[in-house]
Image (tube, rainbow, N blue to C red):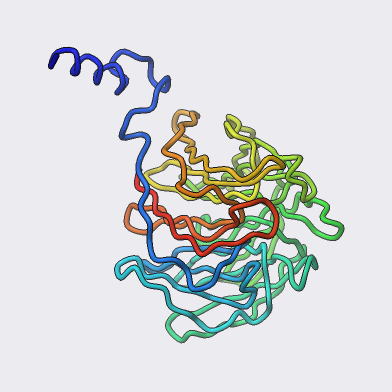
Amino acid sequence: MTRFLFFFSFLFLGGIFPSGSVASAQDLGGWTTGAPMWTERSEVAVAALGGKIYAVGGFGGQNELEIYDPTQDRWGRGAPVPGPVHHAAAVGLNGKLYVIGGYSGWWSPADTFYEYDPAGDRWRILPPMPTARGALAAAVIGGKIHVIGGAGDGRRNTPAHEVYDPATGKWSARAPIPTPRDHLAAVAAGGRLYAVGGRIDGSYARNLSANEVYDPVTDRWRALASLPTARSGIAAAVLDGRIFVFGGESTSGTFDEAESYDPKNGGWRAHARMPTARHGLGAAVVAGRIYVISGGRTPGGSASALNEIFTP
């Protein structure tokens, strides 16, 4: 019996299967639950900064800033956002939190650009983004903020790729994203910008599996292996060099998928499913864990205060 169990374990863990054909127990990872946010929200902007996680705006709290301390498993509040916003993007850089674009009011594309200083609990209004848009994505490469995609007036997609340099305080244009889309995710890994998933013109009946990478040295984009599950309203984060993609929505419901892409070998891998399927969520990495925050359980305007933690 002992020999049989050992042989079965050997098979399951990939001992005789080709690489990538089956996920091992380690590949699947696991989920735990953290303290919920104070406010149920969706379409939030989430970023990590200085070991804490910042959740900004969104349906249910368009002026709200909530701050999570993973070491104490506790949420607090920061100064209100200068203007109400949802479907914005957020990044942390040089000790500051930056919140870019989104929609103000109901569906008015915003060009707003805010900087938050945690040390002083103060906001500052910065030069507006050249292209007003919501449901966009942003990531930091080489000390600069790259903002891609989204939708402008009439919920029409823009291919805009604009970069803000904090050293000069100026915006500049870069090569447009090849597949214009909104409700996508963007991350930086290995000095490159990755744009994953999304939808066409705001319709989650037109979800995409697009996966494209941008090289800032050559100012060029190229297509990569497609996201296995076409979806939008997703969140993404980078841990140990892998790009993890969570959640999303479609006409048939919300997604609980957790899939990751390895830029080194160009392959995708499935992981343990999220405890709660949702969209319009955010993800951030602190100390080797990915915190998947907020989001709606059903397509459209639903919301939650969820804080589910993934450990690969």
Rendered view: 105 above or below 184: below
Rendered view: 43 above or below 237: below
Please give the name of the residue rendered at 73% of the width and 41% of the height, measured from the top-left corner.
179
Residue 301 on image: x %, y %: 69, 60
Between 145 and 167, the residue placed more toward the observer is: 145
Q: In the figure, is residue 176 to the left or right of 211?
A: right
Between 210 and 37, the residue placed more toward the observer is: 37
Residue 252 on image: x %, y %: 68, 40
Rendered view: 18 above or below 312: above
Q: In the figure, is residue 71 to the left or right of 270?
A: left
Q: Which residue appears farthest toward the left when viewing the image?
A: 2
The answer to which quarter of the image holds residue 212 is: top right
Residue 142 on image: x %, y %: 50, 57
The answer to which quarter of the image holds residue 138 is: bottom right
Q: Which residue appears farthest toward the right when viewing the image?
A: 154
Q: In the figure, is residue 183 to the left or right of 305?
A: right
Residue 229 on image: x %, y %: 59, 34
Image quadrant where one finds the C terminus: top left
Between 182 and 249, the residue placed more toward the observer is: 249
Please give the name of the residue rendered at 57% of the width and 51% of the height, measured from the top-left corner.
278
Q: In the figure, is residue 55 to the left or right of 301?
A: left
Please give the name of the residue rendered at 44% of the width and 32% of the height, measured from the top-left corner.
264
Image quadrant where one finds the N terminus: top left
* Count of marks overlaid on the render: 0
Rendered view: 306 above or below 18: below
Between 275 and 79, the residue placed more toward the observer is: 275
Please give the name of the residue rendered at 35% of the width and 40% of the height, measured from the top-left corner.
29
